[in-house]
Amino acid sequence: MMRFFALVFVTALLLAPEALASSLSSALQSPQRLSVTPRTGETTTTFRVPFTARLASTGPSTLSGQQRVRYTVSAAREAGASERGCADSYSATVFVAKAHERVTARLNQVAVGRKWCVGGYSGKVSEIITPACGPIVAQPERRRAAGACPQYIVAEPIGTFHFTVRR
């Protein structure tokens, strides 16, 4: 059993050195406070949250044996009773970013047919790193044979933000 865990750990080190280096360096940093534009908006406002990508995102079609990097942006209402017909949370994934690139996430409830609930919201941006396992049908010439796939998820906080929605 110990050999199995050692094999998985060594496999993860070989397949994801950039992810591990990023997580070690960012673990020493606390999440930064991100700005939101506008800080206060209405129920139909699109809020913009700029952040800097630490690693290049890889998208959903990454080749097997590599790692996938993406960024998630989420926000939730801080308190208060739920209102009917409005959204008290939001989540989106950013798949396209270059390393060290400034990216702006747009939090837009209207695009999905909803509006924001009135109140204060807290949010966060996270860097998510996972292994890419299994064959990719879109590129059969680069397929790998099925084998052991390390199971890990690295979720590093990039930053936090706050905004307010008024009527």
Image (cartoon, grey):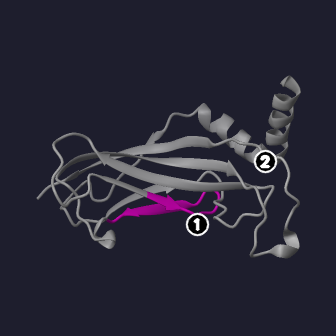
Which residue corresponds to the image point at 64% horizontal and 48% vertical from the top-left? 129
> Is the C terminus in the top left, top right, bottom left or bottom right quadrant?
bottom left
Q: Amino acid at mark 1?
A: Val
- The picture places residue 112, in percent across and down from the top left corner, at 33, 70
Helix or strand or loop: what does disc 2 sit on?
loop
Q: Using residue 148 as the reference point, say whether residue 70 is left or right of it.
A: left
Return the mark for residue 19.
Answer: none
Q: Residues within 10 Å of mark 1 (few under 14, many from 20)?
A: some
Q: Earlier in the sequence, mark 2 or mark 1?
A: 1
Q: Using residue 167 as the reference point, say whether residue 27 is left or right of it.
A: right
Query: Viewer-proximal residue, 141 or 42?
Result: 141
**Which residue was labeled with disc 1?**
96
Query: Viewer-proximal residue, 99 or 58?
Result: 58
- Quarter holding residue 5: top right
Nearer to us of marks 2 and 1 is: 2
- The picture places residue 37, in percent across and down from the top left corner, at 31, 59
Q: Are marks 2 and 1 in contact (CB under 8 Å)?
A: no
Q: Using residue 50 as the reference point, say whether residue 145 is left or right of it.
A: right
Q: Residues within 10 Å of mark 2 (few under 14, many from 20)?
A: some
> Is the N terminus in the top left, top right, bottom left or bottom right quadrant?
top right
**Which residue was labeled with disc 2?**
149
- The picture places residue 2, in percent across and down from the top left corner, at 85, 23
Query: Viewer-proximal residue, 48 or 129?
Result: 129
- Quarter holding residue 111: bottom left
Q: Amino acid at mark 2?
A: Cys
The vertical placement of 23 against 40, above or below, is above
